[in-house]
Amino acid sequence: MNSYSLQAQAYLLQGKVSLLRMNLGDARLYLTKAQQIAEPHGLQLLAYQISSEHDKLLEQFNEWEDLKRRKATISERIDLASLDETIDRIQEKKQIDIPELINEDPLVLLIITEGGALMFSYPFTEEWKSNNDIFGNFLSAFTSFSNEFFSRELDRARFGEFTVLMKSVSNFIICYVFKGQSYQAQQKLSRFAEKLQENDPIRKILDVYYNTGQVIETKDFPFLEVFIKEIFLS
């Protein structure tokens, strides 16, 4: 219990075992728990590995569903889960590869209530600013899954080519939609959430708008845009 590295790797291994049992929901939950241990305790390489494993699972989601549908053999599941590599790393037979970190392409930042209502949105691209259909379809899809995210405390999801990272703060959830790797994106989202909690004026604004059911407009709070650009774009 004094080794955060072993705790995180144990959750990672539990996630892999859940995959072998074809329980994808539990697998994602264990990977989230592993990330929540590794990240705050400075285990950066391990945190990167866990984040990559989670991204890989989401990318292979249809493959896992296909294995589940046709009741694939255990050897097929072990191969897709890369179980041997995970065990080798736990036994220190294999080092964690030093990652090539690539910045993600930010698309939109959202703040949503527990009920799935939109409180704030900040599009990073013209496509998301001008295309109401994309934005509306995404919000509709997210709302339909929001109960699972809140109840199981999952930290990410995938909608087509988009990855969504989620962070709970008080009575709402911050969602960061992007394309690319999740590791650095997750660090930015955590930094943003911490800043919101530390900044009394912004926290009070969020509480007021949450209680009144209003949508926050960036033009009314220009300092919020500066704050977002500093963290996600600089």
Image (cartoon, rainbow, N blue to C red):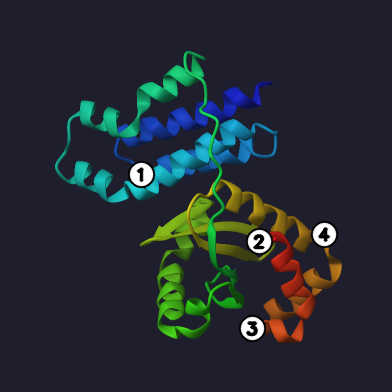
Mark 1 or mark 2: whose residue is earlier in sequence: 1
Residue 137 location (% of width, % of height): 40, 77
* Residue matched to label 3: 215
Mark 4 neighbour class, 10 Å CA radius: few under 14, some 14 to 19, many 20 or more: few
Left/right placement of residue 103 relative to residue 201 reads left
Q: Which of pointers 1 and 2 indicates the residue nearer the eye?
A: 2
Q: Would you place residue 84 above or below residue 80 in this image?
A: above
Name the quadrant containing residue 35.
Answer: top right
> In percent of the image, x 70 and y 34: which residue is there?
41
Q: CA distance from mark 1 to mark 4?
A: 35 Å
Q: Is residue 161 placed above or below 35 in the rendered structure?
A: below
Image disc number at residue 24:
1
The CA span between labels 4 and 3 is 22 Å
Dot 2 corresponds to which residue? 232
**Label 1, label 3: how far apart the Cα atoms are:** 35 Å
Q: Looking at the image, which residue is at 54% across and 72% down?
A: 115
| Amino acid carrying mark 4 in the image | Glu
Q: Quadrant of the C terminus?
A: bottom right
User: Quick one: 70 or 94, which is closer to the camera?
Assistant: 94
What's under tag 3, amino acid-wise? Val
- The quarter holding residue 21 reads top left
Q: Amino acid at mark 1?
A: Leu
Quadrant showing the N terminus: top right
Q: Amino acid at mark 2?
A: Phe
